[in-house]
Image (cartoon, helix red, strand yellow):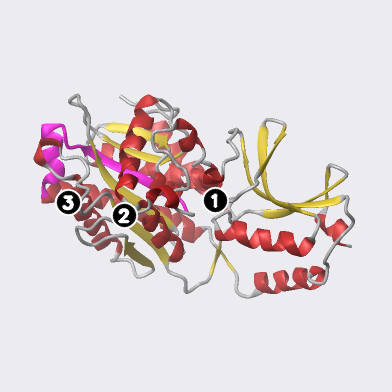
């Protein structure tokens, strides 16, 4: 029912491709872990409190989501190296921004949000979303329904800085921050869908992209799972049963374990080398204050093929963002200045907002130049 850029069904060839791509991405990703660091998974049960979610056939999405989350936790806690955090462990409403904040403060490695779908038809099947541009009206409608909960939050207009859950333009701006994590999010989502369809024979509604606020708030690979349709009598009954909840939770946990094991196998372990190298870099430039006026410093916070309107709510509240087209990509810059110490402060601010790959770029007479050469 939902048109997507990904195939809704994964055959044997696609399954093999997923395994290969999993290995490729993790082998080609620089990951820094300390040997004693636990892998942190934040599990988010959608809705809660005075927000029941959808109540198809009298079942309550908030209750089912919480029960499934607790079952996933039980499975993951069998592994000593995995630490599980729940955004809620009882029937309370947690603001969308708070859910992301919980994950970010915990420095989580993975964020998984659990929901149940609904529709006016007799639709059925499980689907998993990653953050991105809605591929069509249906994807946008799903995101809009899940995002609508922000109106129940106190002071939500100020908190979300002009974000309108009914605006396609607002949803477009959600994608930039998560683009660096999109590949990992998609691969986890694809594996979850594969487990649902193969092990449980659930209809595979595929991996889709949509602008969910709860995913936008996180700074790590994140997925949102729609377990199925409560509005479908048979599927609703299955999801409301203890057996159904345990089965769905077990397959989700299996994918998370697989993701973790792939990450662990391809992790580069370092101790103090990186901090020492950073100290050496700082030592060469910490006394620089102001350079020639024709040298301009900027913080590159994102690069995307999407042309995003330069509104602060599209950039986690950062103001005066510049957009420059380079080839088929748009580069987004923040903190333009001629003073090096100021741009260093801007870099810290950008990283605190979640732009972990932000860096200082230098321009001389309108052309990008080597920062090292400029600082000499």
The Cα atoms of the two marked residues, 3 and 2, are separated by: 12 Å
Judge from the rendering whether residue 144 lies leftward or rightward of residue 267; answer left or right: left
List the residue tagged with mark 1: 317
Q: Is residue 24 visible?
A: no
Q: Is residue 110 magenta?
A: no
The answer to whether marks 2 and 1 mark residues whose Cβ atoms lie closer than 8 Å is no
Cα–Cα gap, marks 2 and 1: 24 Å
- Where does the magenta region start and end? 220-241
Camera-near label (2 vs 1) is 1
Mark 3 crowd level (few <14, some 14–19, many ≥20, 10 Å Cα): many
Residue 309 visible to the viewer: yes
Q: Contact (CB < 8 A) between labels 3 and 2?
A: no
Quickly name the residue at label 3.
63
| Quarter assignment of residue 308 | top right
Looking at marks 3 and 2 on the same chain, the residue that comes earlier in the sequence is marked by 2
Query: Considering the numbered disc 3 on the image, is that residue within a helix, a strand or a loop?
Result: helix
Q: Secondary structure at mark 1?
A: loop
For label 2, the SS is: strand
Residue shown at 63%/62% (left/top)?
Answer: 348
Give the residue at mark 2. 44
Whole-angstrom CA distance, mark 1 to mark 3, is 33 Å
Left-right relation of 136 to 230: right
Which quarter of the picture shows residue 5?
top left
Q: Earlier in the sequence, mark 1 or mark 3?
A: 3
As for residue 239 lying within the magenta part, the answer is yes
Front: mark 1 or 3: 1
How far from the left and from the top, in percent, is residue 258?
Answer: 38, 53
Sequence-wise, the earlier of marks 2 and 1 is 2
Whole-percent x and y of residue 236?
Answer: 14, 38
Rendering coords of residue 127 (x, y %): 31, 37
């Amino acid at each position: 029912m939902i048109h997507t850029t990904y195939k809704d069904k994964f055959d044997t060839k696609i399954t093999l491709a997923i395994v290969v791509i999993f290995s490729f991405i993790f082998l080609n990703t620089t990951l820094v872990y300390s040997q004693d660091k636990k892998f942190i998974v934040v599990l988010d049960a959608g809705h809660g409190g005075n927000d029941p979610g959808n109540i198809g056939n009298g079942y309550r999405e908030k209750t089912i989501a919480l029960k499934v989350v607790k079952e996933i936790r039980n499975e993951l806690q069998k592994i000593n190296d995995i630490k599980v955090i729940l955004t809620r462990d009882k029937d309370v409403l947690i603001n969308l921004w708070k859910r992301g904040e919980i994950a970010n403060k915990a420095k989580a490695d993975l964020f998984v949000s659990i929901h149940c779908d609904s529709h006016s038809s007799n639709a059925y099947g499980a689907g998993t979303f990653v953050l991105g541009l809605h591929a069509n009206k249906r994807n946008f409608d799903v995101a809009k329904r899940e995002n609508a909960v922000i109106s129940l939050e106190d002071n939500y207009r100020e908190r979300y800085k002009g974000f309108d859950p009914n605006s396609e333009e607002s949803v477009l701006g959600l994608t930039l921050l998560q683009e660096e994590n999109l590949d990992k999010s998609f691969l986890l989502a694809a594996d979850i869908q594969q487990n649902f369809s193969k092990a449980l024979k659930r209809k595979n509604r595929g991996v889709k992209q949509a602008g969910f606020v709860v995913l936008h708030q996180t700074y790590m690979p994140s997925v949102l799972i729609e377990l199925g349709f409560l509005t479908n009598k048979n599927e609703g009954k299955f999801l409301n049963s203890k057996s159904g909840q345990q089965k769905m939770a077990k397959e989700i946990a299996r994918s998370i374990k697989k993701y973790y094991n792939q990450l662990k196998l391809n992790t580069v372990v370092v101790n103090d080398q990186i901090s020492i190298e950073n100290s050496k870099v700082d030592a060469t430039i910490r006394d620089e204050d102001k350079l020639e006026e024709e040298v301009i410093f900027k913080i590159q916070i994102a690069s995307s093929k999407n042309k995003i309107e330069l509104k602060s709510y599209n950039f986690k509240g950062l103001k005066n963002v510049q957009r420059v087209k380079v080839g088929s990509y748009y580069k987004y810059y923040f903190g333009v200045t001629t003073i090096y110490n100021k741009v260093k402060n801007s870099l810290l601010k950008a990283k605190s907002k979640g732009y972990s790959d932000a860096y200082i770029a230098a321009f001389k007479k309108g052309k990008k130049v080597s920062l090292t050469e400029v600082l000499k």
